[in-house]
């Protein structure tokens, strides 16, 4: 904002701004919110303790006057003038340099580029930096600024398939951390391309809403049978860990075909292309089917989702094929009067067809 380069918008509409306002060589943190939708318009002015101290004699009058001003820029000029007048009357503060650390933060954010700032909290203790990878995917680096910044390194978090690690040294800056973050994104570009292809062209049963850190996908193969894969994010075209879910009589032929054709796997092709070739099948997709065809309810709790778990245990009786959540089946078998246990397994009967059924101990 012209003449107020340390003030920045805190929302998309520009009706809320925050930052530092200079008056008589002092810097004051302010947080200004304009409620245009209310009638009459209401302006809220908040800020640091020093702001309230200087403006206390005229604060009520100033807020009433701000309600009559049309633009935020003119409001800032009005606040600045009021601060200068009160400082002249009361004299300068002995604590002019009390916000030096915030000047450093603003300078570092400016070096990163304001277009990279996705979010910043009113107290400047939390900020989000946005990076765009080569496939136009958006990634957010969340940063928490400590009181002793930059001498003390910030905490951070982001959605990466492996933990992002950055060791903060005394002369480091947010730009240096953000640059390493961008370089790390490039390492996983192929991994995300592969996972995006799976998400777009197959029915993903779990996780229901995949994040950028998720390396596993449970993919529907047919009604009552699915494939759980875990992809290596560093070598994403290599053979993933595979686990087949469904009745053993149906799963076994699929597993056998995978083992027979595994030599056809090519690390020059995507995971989906390889799976189609090795399994010799076309995966059900959003263009050819509905997800409800594969979301079979648990025969005990009558729900599809139990927390984040889906029914993954299936009765092997071809006339039954009922599916269950592992937790539901475990609790059911555990309460049977004739339950048997061996090592880490419980043996009982299917609640629908009474055929033998087992599950692992939770």
Image (cartoon, helix red, strand yellow):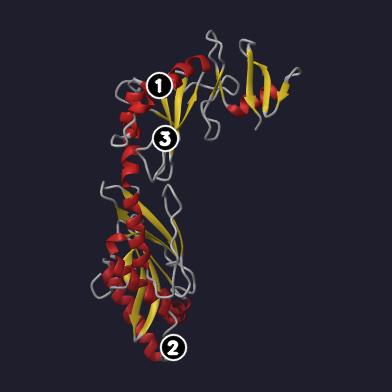
For mark 3, what is the residue? Answer: 240
Dot 1 or dot 2: first in sequence order is 2
Percent x, y of residue 48: 45, 75
Task: Please name whichever residue, 139 or 19, is drawn nearer the observer in this view of the structure.
Answer: 139
In this view, the mark in front (1 or 2):
1
In this view, the mark in front (3 or 2):
3
Question: Does 110 sit left or right of 231 as displayed?
Answer: left
- For the point 41% across and 49% down, the residue is 160
For mark 1, what is the residue? Answer: 260
How many angstroms separate mark 1 from mark 3 (CA)?
16 Å
How many angstroms separate mark 1 from mark 2 (CA)?
80 Å
Please tell me how crowded label 2 is: few (under 14), some (14-19), or many (20+) other residues with Cα within 10 Å: few
The residue positioned farthest toward the left in the image shown:
2
Give the label on residue 93, or none. Answer: 2
Dot 1 or dot 3: first in sequence order is 3
- For the point 63% across and 24% down, the residue is 359
- Element at label 2: loop
Q: Is residue 219 at all visible to an observer of this figure?
A: yes
In this view, the mark in front (1 or 3):
1
- Element at label 1: helix
> How many circles with numbers are drawn on the protein?
3
> For residue 238, which quarter of the picture?
top left
Please tell me how crowded label 1 is: few (under 14), some (14-19), or many (20+) other residues with Cα within 10 Å: few
- State if disc 2 and disc 1 touch (CB < 8 Å): no
- Element at label 3: loop
**Residue 141, above or below 43:** above
Please tell me how crowded label 3 is: few (under 14), some (14-19), or many (20+) other residues with Cα within 10 Å: some
> For residue 40, which quarter of the picture?
bottom left
């Amino acid at each position: 904002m012209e003449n107020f380069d340390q003030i920045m918008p805190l929302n998309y509409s520009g009706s809320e701004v925050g930052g530092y306002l200079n008056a008589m060589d002092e810097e004051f943190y302010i947080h200004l919110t304009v409620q245009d939708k209310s009638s009459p318009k209401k302006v809220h002015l908040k800020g640091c303790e020093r702001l309230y101290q200087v403006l206390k004699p005229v604060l009520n009058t100033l807020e009433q006057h701000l309600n009559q001003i049309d633009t935020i820029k003119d409001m800032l000029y009005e606040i600045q003038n009021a601060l200068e007048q009160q400082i002249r009357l009361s004299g300068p503060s002995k604590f002019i340099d009390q916000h030096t650390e915030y000047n450093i933060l603003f300078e570092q954010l400016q070096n990163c580029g304001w277009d990279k700032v996705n979010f910043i909290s009113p107290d400047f203790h939390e900020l989000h930096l946005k990076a765009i990878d080569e496939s136009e995917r958006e990634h957010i680096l969340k940063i928490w600024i400590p009181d002793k910044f930059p001498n003390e390194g910030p905490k951070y978090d982001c959605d990466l398939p492996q933990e992002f690690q950055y060791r903060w040294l005394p002369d480091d800056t947010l730009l240096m951390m953000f640059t390493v973050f961008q370089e790390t994104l490039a390492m996983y570009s192929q991994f995300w391309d592969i996972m995006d292809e799976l998400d777009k062209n197959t029915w993903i049963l779990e996780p229901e809403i995949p994040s950028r850190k998720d390396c596993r996908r449970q993919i529907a193969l047919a009604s009552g049978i699915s494939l759980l894969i875990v992809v290596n994010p560093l070598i994403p075209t290599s053979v993933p860990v595979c686990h087949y879910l469904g009745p053993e009589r149906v799963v076994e032929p699929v597993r056998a075909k995978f083992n027979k054709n595994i030599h056809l796997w090519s690390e020059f092709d995507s995971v989906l292309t390889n799976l189609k070739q090795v399994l010799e099948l076309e995966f059900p997709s959003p263009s050819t089917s509905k997800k409800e065809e594969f979301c079979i309810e648990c025969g005990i709790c009558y729900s599809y989702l139990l927390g984040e778990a889906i029914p993954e245990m299936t009765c092997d009786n071809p006339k039954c094929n009922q599916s269950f959540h592992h937790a539901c089946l475990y609790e059911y078998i555990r309460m049977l009067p004739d339950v048997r246990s061996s090592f880490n397994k419980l043996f009982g009967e299917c609640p629908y067809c009474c055929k033998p059924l087992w599950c692992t101990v939770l």
